Image (tube, rainbow, N blue to C red):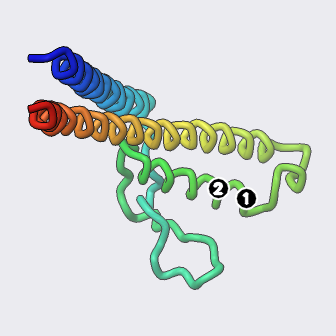
Amino acid sequence: MSGIELYGVAGVGFMGVALVALGIFLAFKGILARMEITAALLEENASTPSGGAPGAGAPAGDRPSFDPGMPTQPIRDAATARTRIDEIKFRTLADGGYQALPVEGDRRQWFLNGLVIRSALGIAVMGFGVSNIAIALGASLMLIGGTSLAVGIPLILAAVD
């Protein structure tokens, strides 16, 4: 084996192994982040509104309707978190914004509580998105690294011969 072959095989091999290892690390961290977000939501006992999802029969331009007869479901993913955000937004913005609410009474505090919950759930939705990106990037890096190992090394050996 000549020096060029040795350096080529070692370089491609090192790059392939490094990409596979980085891919495994990113996918693992993405999965751990998803599990951590889900566990935090379950620990807080976060659940969807009593309707579970906005009503499908609402005319265009109307606010979503929530059927109080349907059971709640725990928030475990981005879709149910978005449903809860929509429900809180619908209920808190029904009377206008914060400035439109009367100063006396507890309606402003109720609005702020809804805003805090919406913000926290929005962060959870972003966390799910980032974890999905990390998992997808990890899978892509594993594929690229595996391909460079499976194809790159034989190509180098065939080119040198």
Q: From the image, which quarter does the N terminus lie in?
A: top left
Residue 39 on image: x %, y %: 36, 28
Q: How far apart in space, not on screen, are marks 2 and 1 (Cα)?
A: 6 Å
Residue 87 on image: x %, y %: 56, 57
Residue 9: name its quadrant: top left
The answer to whether 2 is drawn above or below residue 134 in the figure is above
Which secondary structure lies at badge 1? loop
Q: Is residue 28 visible?
A: no
The answer to whether 26 is drawn above or below residue 101 in the figure is above
Q: Are marks 2 and 1 in contact (CB under 8 Å)?
A: yes
How many neighbours does mark 2 have within 10 angstroms: few (below 14), some (14-19), or many (20 or more)? some
- Residue that badge 2 annotates: 89
Q: Is residue 30 left or right of residue 46?
A: left
Q: Is residue 104 visible?
A: yes
Q: Residue at x 43, y 47 (%)?
A: 78
Q: Residue at x 50, y 53 (%)?
A: 82
Residue 37: name its quadrant: top left
- Residue that badge 1 annotates: 93
Residue 123 on image: x %, y %: 56, 37
> Which sits in the foreground, 117 or 150?
150
The answer to whether 75 is drawn above or below residue 56 in the figure is above
Q: Is residue 146 left or right of residue 68?
A: left
Amino acid type of the residue that numbered disc 2 sits on in the rendered structure: Lys
Amino acid type of the residue that numbered disc 1 sits on in the rendered structure: Leu
Q: From the image, which quarter does the C terminus lie in?
A: top left
Which secondary structure lies at badge 2? helix
Q: Residue at x 63, y 40 (%)?
A: 119
Residue 6 on image: x %, y %: 17, 17
How many neighbours does mark 1 have within 10 angstroms: few (below 14), some (14-19), or many (20 or more)? few
Please tell me how many numbered marks the rendered image carries. Answer: 2
